[in-house]
Amino acid sequence: MRAVALLFPALALLGADPSAFESRKAAIRALLERSDFAAALDQARAINREWPDDIAGYQLMAAAHLGIGNYTEAEQAVQWMLDLRIGKADAQGWLLVATIREVTGDIDGALDAVNIGYAGLAPGRERDRLALLARSGHLNCLAGKLEAAERVLRDALAAAPGDEDSLEALARVKIARGRRDEALEIFRELARSTGNPRYLYQVAVAGGGPSVYAAFEGAARERMLATDNANRELALFYAGPGKRPAEALAIARREAGRRHDVWTLDALAVALQANGKTEDARATMKRILATGVRYPEILRHAVKMNLKPL
């Protein structure tokens, strides 16, 4: 028995009950869904220490690192996952690979990862299929392949008409194609169906008007202390049309203390700029651009600071 405990310390610790590990991993996935990335990372690290050859553990660590903005650590965890699978991964693994490549500006590489994941998809994995199609549509949009993006997203929505990721990606394709009214309607439907203030913000930006901004502000402030919040959008609103730059900076700084992904740092840079802290804003934006990111919204903010992608 001692030899078994030495060979399998994790199972010995849990009374040789693999279901206990599955339960813990499910709890981490729930934390990720709520954007509680710090707690998810702590728990994923604990699982990894106890069961270092568990592939899903590396996936969970990578997802948490990505949410926080630890891109180097996320890439390392994904590489461990790929090594353990001898160069192969499941759909969720390839989506993580795609996310890392996307945020570092390798859109073609991200599309390759999605295509590999789709090609290796096992029968009956409809949820994974939808996730891969939604990401393919999103990435094709970023690559400027708008017809391909819309075609893929139509396929996804034919199978699941209310799929949130596919609808959001389709709305952004509509904007890229100059069909703002159609995008506006999609964002309105997402705001109604999910209650997420991020979509109210998108409605306002797409032309919803002052009343929508007011509705967004109220909904976003109610969720300011939640891990799944709209603080980035609230900071952008206060830095711009909301005309409360000091509050924008306070919100952005608090959020950046919790996570430093490119989107959170982008809101911080915009808030710094709105408060006349130009050099700090430029330094923050340079940190973002150093990742290689190619998101149009972030690049527009960079241009306003007289900065170009590296």
Image (spheres, helix red, strand yellow):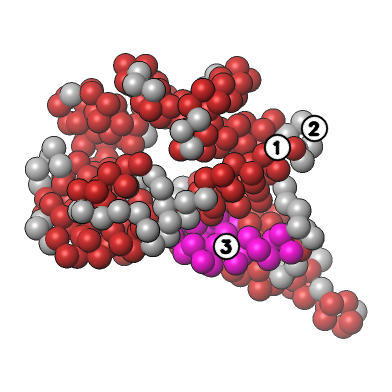
Looking at the image, tell me whether mark 2 or mark 3 is earlier in sequence order.
3
Q: Report if residue 207 is visible in the image.
A: yes
Relative placement, left or right, of 88 versus 108 is right
Nearest the camera: 231 or 139? 139
The range drawn in magenta is: 60-83
**Point 35% across, 41% down: residue:** 296
Nearest the camera: 119 or 130? 119
Nearest the camera: 54 or 2? 54
The amino acid pointed to by label 2 is Pro
Mark 2 is surrounded, within 10 Å at the Cα level, by few (under 14), some (14 to 19) or many (20 or more) other residues, namely few
Nearest the camera: 261 or 197? 261
Q: Indicate whether 50 appears above or below 247.
A: below
Q: Is residue 77 magenta?
A: yes
- Residue under label 3: 75
- Residue under label 2: 123
Tell me how far mark 2 sits from mark 3, CA to CA.
Answer: 28 Å
Tell me how far mark 1 sits from mark 2, CA to CA.
Answer: 11 Å
For the residues labelled 2 and 3, say whether their Cβ atoms are less than 8 Å apart.
no
- Residue under label 1: 118
Mark 3 is surrounded, within 10 Å at the Cα level, by few (under 14), some (14 to 19) or many (20 or more) other residues, namely many
- The quadrant of the picture occupied by the C terminus is bottom left
Looking at the image, tell me whether mark 1 or mark 2 is earlier in sequence order.
1
Q: Indicate whether 188 appears above or below 5.
A: above
**Point 36% across, 26% down: residue:** 175
